[in-house]
Image: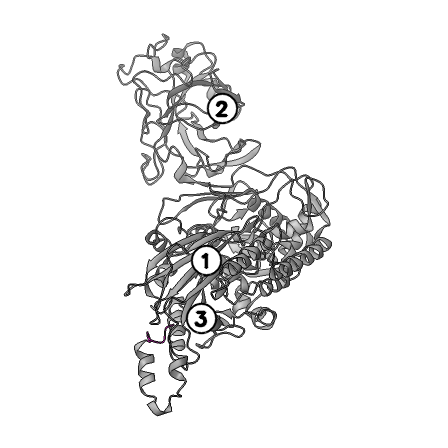
Amino acid sequence: MHPVRLSAAAAAVTLLVPLGAVPALAADADAPAAKGKDVQLLSLTDFHGRLGDGAGAGLASVIERERSLHKDIPTALVSSGDNVGASTYASSSQQDNPTIDYLNAIELDASSVGNHEFDKGADDIANRLSKRADFPFLGANVYTKGTQNIAPGMKAYKVIEQGGVKIGVIGVVTKETASLVSPDGIKDVTFGDPLEGINRAAKEMAALPADQKPDMTVLTAHIGSSQPDKTLEVAKQAGPEFKKIVEGADASIDAMYFGHTHLSMNFTERIPGTDRTRPIMQASNYGTKVGQSILTSEGNGDWTVKDGTDKLLETKGVDFDSAAVKKAKGIIEDAEDKAKEIGSEVAGTIADDFDRAKKDDGAEDRAAESTLGNLVGDALKEGTEGSQLKAADLGLTNPGGMRADLKKDSQFGSEKPGEVTVGELNQVLPFANDYGVVALKGKDLEEVFEQQFQPEGSSRPFLHLGVSKNVRVVYDSKDTKQRVKSVLIDGKKIDADKTYRVATLSFLAAGGDNFTALSKGEFEQSGLTDFDVWKSYFAKHKDLAPDRRERQADAAEDMIEANDLSYSVKVAQGGGETGQRYELTLAAKKDVPGPLRFAVSAPQGAKVAFAAAEGTKADGSELIIEARRAGTAKVAFTVSGGAQGAQASARGARAAAAQAAPATAQPLQVALTSDRAHAFWDDDPLPLVHAAEVDAAPAPDPTQPPSEQPSDEPSQDPSQDPSQGPGQPGPDEEPSSTSGPQRPGDDGRDDSGSGSGHLPRTGAQIAGLVGAAALLLLVGGATMALTRRRD
């Protein structure tokens, strides 16, 4: 805030004061900083108690180094929140007290609250954190419920003084905090519009007595953008709250420091309506970077960024010798010693790493499936066994609840490779959520999966739930209305009116992370925490190995839905004593990842035999098809025995046709999908089951007179030749999407479900099954519902 740049309201207040009432010293106290006066601003964000592994020492060293290098100018150190919560075990095992002590040691001047400061509730800020900290917690948009009063333990702003320069620091937190923490802990506070809080605080500072007015104003905001690494315009479009602040915050704000999204940002931009510039920065997370800006006074109350001084400084490996660094290192060492004592007990063993999902650059990706998330889902489902609760039908966890990976070779204490300690388990699930079960109707459970697609404007558009291994979800990311296409539990499609017991965390049960559908059911508490259940799971299961088969798949990646692959089955002319012959045709516009699984459900007593073909392997009445190149391929198979085989067992097609009984013939049920036994991981080519029905016998050739019987002579059509295997497309053949199962809503059936489509030449009827969910196939040793393509 600048004495000469008051808002109109503040100026009006000043004019109402009689000139004689103004002390003689007011003019000097209100004088702007001298022209050319420099101030260094250092910032951090989202530290999350990362004391160990050199992070805390490196952060302290960079801060102290820059203070030393610029000892002739004032320096202020600010944080944009999430200093505590989701911390490593050295801090979390001691309620994050070591982190507060560490921040005191490095002389943090002020910090906005982050959503994680509310992990233990607003009362924890008022009664513990704010009392232990030597710095203020700022929350200009956090109010006591029903009022505009700043909640206890927080301030809207704080004016600090460094080297004769008064620096006003405003702090705000994302309005999303209400959905990011347990509702019970924030029942007495509300989160208002951050921009309103910012501008209100700026006006309040403008109205301060002259000797208290800040010379400079800094914003710390626990708000960010999901795409801050390109241009400011891109960053604004990816963060609605961020955009609103950058464009609408009071012009008196000389520097802006953001957080929350754990990403780096460094822009120097012109302040709207002025010719001055200000830094807009975000210093990554976990103490890995320090934001640095040097601002220069223009002598009239204005400040601008000194050329080349806005930097993000790396902290890894930096070691600086100072009293503050030594004190910080001592706090870290004491915290780690205590944590090792508490958490060095071996809790279990793993055979390989369990990881959170990662982006290409190594950053955490909460929009993708993870082996760790699914393992937590398994543990939550099983957790009822150690409680008074009835068994759960499935387990669910949110991706943001996992704060570290489980590495086979990581070392917490003196444990052996593959051993997992209590401390390491706590680093994964550090929040100590209550564990319990929510009873939900099937329709509400489906809505839970729909809510993985977050509300418009959310900083993370999609949050991928970790699920237990008995759950299979198919959603369509390209559908803008009903995205969830199928939810199977134990191989059965969920019933909209049936009640399902969902084992989960109190955070999710209360509707956290915008999963409000979970709050529709009553949360049955167990008296246990998620960590209790997590630890018990490792005590029961030794040498745990990651399950790399995805449990949620995107139908938008389905090659048949994308018209990149089609398949058809037709009855081949010329069946004989070996049974009725059929032909499977695959037509691909692109290379197809494998393996796929083609399943035939023949009438009772019938046997299915597949002709040998390159890249295929028979598995009973199913055919495993390995990865294949683009093109068209054919595989022949026969069905013999049973009601259908008996019709074709007489010698010659003429005799078979004579004995056929079309009125009672049973059609084949067929389906093509990916092989669920294979470890697909975000690359499933056919997550949907594409089912169809094939007539039991060929229709009469329309070119023959009605009285003429089929000939015993083999077909001369090369497309009938079963010797043409995968990888041998015909020279003029193109992939077709018309001869296989039709798209939903265009399946050649009338409202009653009867079929009217016929394959060319043979008249074999093929269409998407209606009600095929009742038909089960054994796939990869697990029961799978055979459904229509968009089940």
Pointers 3 and 1 in contact (C-beta within 8 Å): no
Pointers 1 and 2 in contact (C-beta within 8 Å): no
Instruction: Locate residue 780: give its quadrant.
Output: top right
Of 173 and 83, the residue lying toward us? 83
Q: Dot 3 corresponds to which residue?
A: 167
Q: Dot 1 corresponds to which residue?
A: 292
- Judged by depth in the image, the label closer to the viewer, 1 or 2, is 1
Of 112 and 56, the residue lying toward us? 56
For the N terminus, which image quadrant? Answer: bottom left
Tell me the number on the disc at residue 623: 2
Which amino acid, by three-letter code, is at mark 1? Answer: Gln
Instruction: Locate residue 387: give its quadrant.
Output: bottom right
Left or right: 528 with respect to 239? Answer: right
- Which secondary structure type mostly characterizes the magenta part of the structure? loop
Q: Position of residue 294 (x, y in %)?
A: 42, 61
Q: Which residues are magenta?
A: 1-6
Colour scheme of the picture: one colour
Q: How far is disc 1 from disc 2 in space, using C-alphas?
A: 62 Å
Number of marks: 3
Of 431 and 725, the residue lying toward us? 431
Mark nearer the N terminus (1 vs 2): 1
Indicate whether residue 338 is drawn in magenta. Answer: no
